[in-house]
Amino acid sequence: MLQQSVSSKSVSQSSKEEVGSASDVRGSRTYSYEESFAASVEYFGGDTFAANVWLSKYALQAVRKNDDSPAEYLEKTPEAMHRRMAREFARIEARYPNPMSEDEIFDLFEGFRYVVPQGSPMSGIGNPHKVQSLSNCFVLNSPEDSYAGIMHVDQQQAQIMKRRGGVGFDISTLRPRGLPTANAAVTTDGVGVFMERYSNTTKEVAQGGRRGALMLTCDVHHPEVRTFATRKNDKTSCKKCGHEERTKVTGANVSLRLSDEFLEAVEKGEEYQLRWPVDSKKPTIEEWVDAGEVWDLIMDSAHQSAEPGLLFWDHARRMTPADIYSDEGFASTSTNPCGEIILSPGDSCRLSVCNLTAFVVDPFSANPSYDWEKYGDIVQKAQRLMDDLIDLEIEQIDKILTKIEEDPESESVKVIELSMWREIREAAVNGRRTGLGITGLGDTLAMMNLRYGSPKSLDFVESLYKHLAINSYTSSIRLAEERGAFPVCDVEKEKGHPFLERVLAELPAGVVEAYREHGRRNIANTTTAPTGSVSILTQTTSGIEPAFALAYMRRKKVNPDDANARVDFTDGTGDTWQHFHILHHVFAKWCEVTGRDFDEVLDRIQSGDMSDVEASPYHGAMANDIDWQARVEGQGRAQKWVCHAISSTVNLPRGTTVDTVKDVYMTAWRSGCKGVTLYVEGSRDGVLLREFEAMEEFQFHDAPKRPEKLECDVHHSRVKQGDAYLNWVFVVGKLEDKAYEIFGGFSDEIELAKKIKSGWVVKRSLKGGSKYDLHYGDEEDPHKVKDMVKVFNNPDQGVFTRIVSTALRHGTPVQFLVEQLQREREADMFTFSKGMSRVLKGYIPDGTKAGRTRKCPECAAEDSLVYQEGCVSCTACGHSKCG
């Protein structure tokens, strides 16, 4: 359960043999879900959430025989994954001088203790069953200002997302609304329409049950900056509960690129120029407007919906070393979906992190210390592995290109995908960009008895990031000696770059001399990503963020392809969620060190006694506790030593004013941040949702009060079972023309056409679909409502229909109930559950998307199955099936 319990594991000879056979895809050893889950829960010290995340996202699976066959795993625990990755990294290392061995690399990965390749590398390295990129994020060329150019990028986006990548690109190149076009439209609809187009593509492209991630950026000088900034603010309200849902651009994050020109105009109360093209000295469109008016509009939007995020673009480009090579194609234009990687068009980046908690000596003691020497050594090895990861990615891109070339489509269809991946390959070869970061900062500060946000903690944070930069760049320079610099590297061209000069001033003289002679291996090295899933596996705080809470409920989105997932909640969009109770692991370590019983501490917290928390270094140091100025200053001091950017969210309490939001952003700009995201509590549902998780309490839905009189439909069903016929009757009570409850049973057990003892009045008995009125309570005693189910059902059916009716009354979408009733694969068509499912199908509105079974069994199209007249039909190929 504790990070230390994971870290202390060693690989015995027997476990090595198990790992070898489990990760060797040529072997025959496979594990059932139950076997792998049980072993993984033990591996994570009883942490079922970590085990679930690892199995659903990263564990290598055998190829299924068909969609109905159960999942079989080639890896029983993360040890097998780490051995798989270590073997592949060692293969790359063997190409170069002074290679690290497989065991040495495995020791860096084992237990998620030191180095954690993030996301795509864990699922893709050494995986022969998926042709996917190992890059986490990509930036595409901005769309050319034509419909063909717009759709060209749309297709590129889809092609990247189907390989598991997140995408970002800038749309400032699109002409503003109302300008003439040389087509039938006469004038353009502007950026808003095309924001929607790209957002929809993100929602349409499946990634093994996940959805892609998209960042759209736009320059603050674009004439439609107001449209871009407010596009996501449109809402609709639920008629029943009043809950508001956003309806525009729901498949993308949006950020504005702010120039120093604009921000200085805001400070001075001056006008600034709207222009298009935005980077033209002689723009086609030019308008001077009040900078303060545009700033207020942006701030209002950020205050109410946490978007747009802001990128301080001039500073970002000035301080990103890759931009030295703008003439060689490495000019930054946008960021990845979470904003931590600033990229040039056609470039991509892979991510790995160092787990900072591993280097604390005597955590939570009176005299904890940090092992700076060990930390530096691990960072240098991690940077070496990051460079190896580029070689592994180039191999993967070559596999992707081979697959595309061998696909049966015509050359005219394949040309866009082929040219895109060739461009990505060229950028990987020429720049060798890496994304090395950290995770566990919040816990590390607590382990050092430093309160997150305190002056001493800010000094320590800067030291951590300074050492990250020094050792990452030392490693990159030494790699250039051994392996050669990135092909476009030009040391003379790099002279005077403010970020590089800052880092070089801290390097040993011998390393600087080596740089002058050999250059660097990587065009840009470091970042800080959100590490949402990774922090679950390291059992620490995420990235640069503080602890969210010490005990809370976390919701994990259910992958529709995961038959083993438990559905605890269905939201208004039909997405399903599984709930996990989370106990903060490193806080449990604090309890252990200070002699407290963790279970007793939790009992006291749940009873409202916070004395233990107040005595811990987490007191006043959790997400909603920290002063925003300290958060921003800490990010700015870290950014001094990060060559890409930092993904971080500044949390503000409910009731925060717009003026405070303005102060946060202005302070972030002055502090040297390259970008920042801000969240005012309650301004947006699921704002903590990143790739698939949300931290929030369970939402209960009250059922509408049962009226005294309810319209109902009576459905008769006569089926043959063996030599006999069974006659079923189902009664569906309706409220506002929706199914409200259902009862049923054998027809000879049900009295129709007269008042019955429970008080139900049914006028007459006809075939299925006839409508009646159901009265609750009889005329003599309107309050006499007995157990109505017993009138219709035997005891077993009574319990069954109570559960289904309760779900209907509390708002569960009918399609989910139908699909659960049909999951009894061994049952024939004439069981009670199947009969009930056939009746309820008639109450699913046409066009409703299938709840869990979203992949067409005929054409394999994702998310294409909808209900039409009770039958599931594919919108892609027309396949239809009724059960």
Image (cartoon, rainbow, N blue to C red):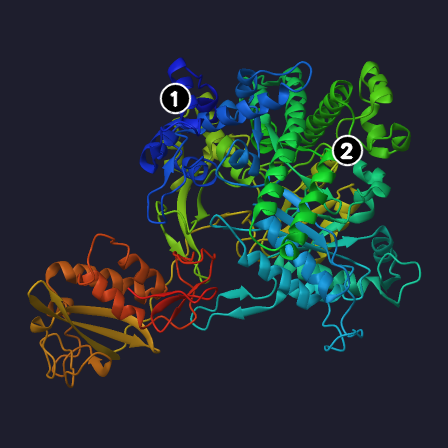
Q: CA distance from mark 1 to mark 2?
A: 40 Å
Q: Say which element carries label 1.
A: helix
Is residue 443 toward the left or the right of residue 301 in the image? left
687 lies above or below 271: above
Q: Residues within 10 Å of mark 1 (few under 14, many from 20)?
A: some
Query: Three-letter amino acid code at disc 1?
Result: Glu
Q: Which residue is mark 2?
A: 523
Neighbourhood count class around disc 2 (C-alpha, 10 Å): few under 14, some 14–19, many 20 upward: many
Asked whether 643 or 384 is in front, the reply is 384
Name the residue carrying label 1: 18
Rendered location of residue 515, percent (x, y): 83, 21
Residue 526 appearing in the image: yes
**Looking at the figure, which quarter contains the N terminus?**
top left
In percent of the image, x 76 and y 71: which residue is there? 177
Q: Quadrant of residue 645?
A: top right
**Quarter occupied by the C terminus:** bottom left
Residue type, numbered disc 2:
Ile
- Above or below, 721 relative to 83: below
